[in-house]
Amino acid sequence: MKRRNFLSLTAGAAAATGLAACGNSGPADTTGGGSGGGDAATYWFLSGPPGEPIRQGAVDRFNKANSGNQIKVTAIQNDTYKDKLKTAIGAGQAPSIIWGWGGGGLKSYVDAGQVDDLTDWFAQNAAVKNRLFPASFGPATVDGKIYAMPAETVQPIIMLYNKEAFEKAGVANPPQTWAELMSILPKFNDKGIAPLSLAGQSRWTNMMWLELLFDRIGGPDVFNNAYDGQKDAWSNPAAIDALTKIQELINAKGFVKGFSSVTADSNADQALLYRGKAAMELHGSWSYGIIKADGGNFIKDGKLGFFNFPAVDGGKGDPTNVYGNAGQFLSISSKASEKQKETAKKFFASLLDDQEQQGWIDSGGVPIVQGSNSKLASSPDKDFLNFIYDVSSKAKNFGQSWDQALSPSSAETLLQNIAKLFQLQITPQQFATNMNATIGK
């Protein structure tokens, strides 16, 4: 398998998929630890709504049904999760079950012998594999072998907007092109409404803008060439154009004032949107669940709108292309005991039952179970869920988030330079030069 193939998910694979959802439970028990002591398997995952109670519910149901195979969990905030996991793995204290995004992070664990090869297990448990989206196995696969269990939901990056803010600014429709986006910025600013919300302190939120702009201007190969190690790939004219357009957007007061101090973990970026302080936001589809949980009647009152990222006039990228998460991924630590590994595999086989699927649907998510799109019709969130289904299944290319596709060290350099670019501390060319220096390392 070529490296690009586990990074990029084709429309053919996505179109063959269906959709579904998940269950509900209380707050996570934080008594978990590394793989070492005791028979119970340990499991770390992200905290916060809407995912934490659904993940906890899946564990609770498993523990209740399997008295001889128990799981202890630890819920950790997004911005600190990777560092805690990296430290634990380096110290030989990884959790038995490692929650992640697949791609480059998973490959680094595979190269270091830190996670088990699950290829034979999936071959022996074909029913587990065959019920999931084929596309979800891309980021779980390294050199043709499967090292992670795809789980949870498909999460494309999309544009969200506040319909009431649009009305106040006299903007009739969401922008379909980059030129239209730039043209409506003054209308919002004149009304004291930030055109775009952004949790810039978290850095990966800034990255989403570059992922889509690179693609819209030059197509998937612009980033893929850098990923594949092509010399000076970040200096591609399409890349420089995208980097320049971002700084033009910043200089035109496109983002909320002080965006570099807003954090994603606090969900402050979503709050700016549903409180009418910002008109639009580019974010993962999981934002719908956050807004539904925290935004009062904002969704119920019909104030939330959504659309795909605008096209760029003259761009080579297909406007249906999307980036994000083709699923979430659970690996088994090679340091886990045989008992813990047995528990992990039994848990994998239990995932995405009807209750868990319904939980994800109720939270505004689209599970990665084939044929589950039939369950969306009865959801009060069916308009949004069907939009996500269409965006994901019709995309000509479903690219993985850059910081998940790259190795952890390259991803950190990327995020550092993105932060500097958005703070106008470096030019597009300096960004390209800095990133070209990472190629092949």
Image (cartoon, rainbow, N blue to C red):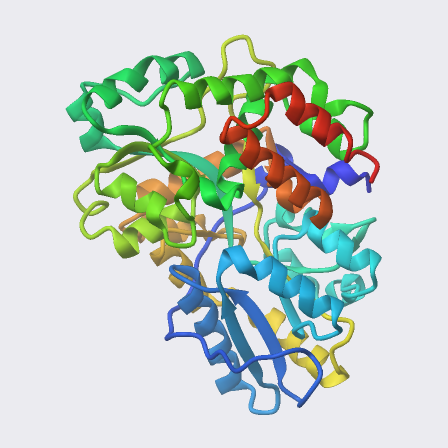
Q: Nearer the viewer, residue 353 or 408?
A: 408
Vertical side of 80 occupied by 39: above or below: below
Vertical side of 173 occupied by 381: above or below: below
Q: Position of residue 223 (x, y in %)?
A: 68, 29
Q: Position of residue 260 (x, y in %)?
A: 43, 39
Quadrant in which residue 106 is drawn: bottom right
Q: Residue furthest front?
A: 425
Residue at the location (54% across, 52% down)? 370
Residue at the location (59% across, 25% down)? 426
Residue at the location (38% across, 47% down)? 287
Q: Is residue 127 visible?
A: no
Left or right position of 171 against 309: left
Q: Nearer the viewer, residue 251 or 286?
A: 251
Vertical side of 292 occupied by 95: above or below: below
Quadrant in which residue 186 is drawn: top left
Q: Residue furthest top?
A: 314
Q: Position of residue 208 (x, y in %)?
A: 52, 35
The C terminus lies in quadrant? top right
The N terminus lies in quadrant? top right
Q: Is residue 122 visible?
A: yes
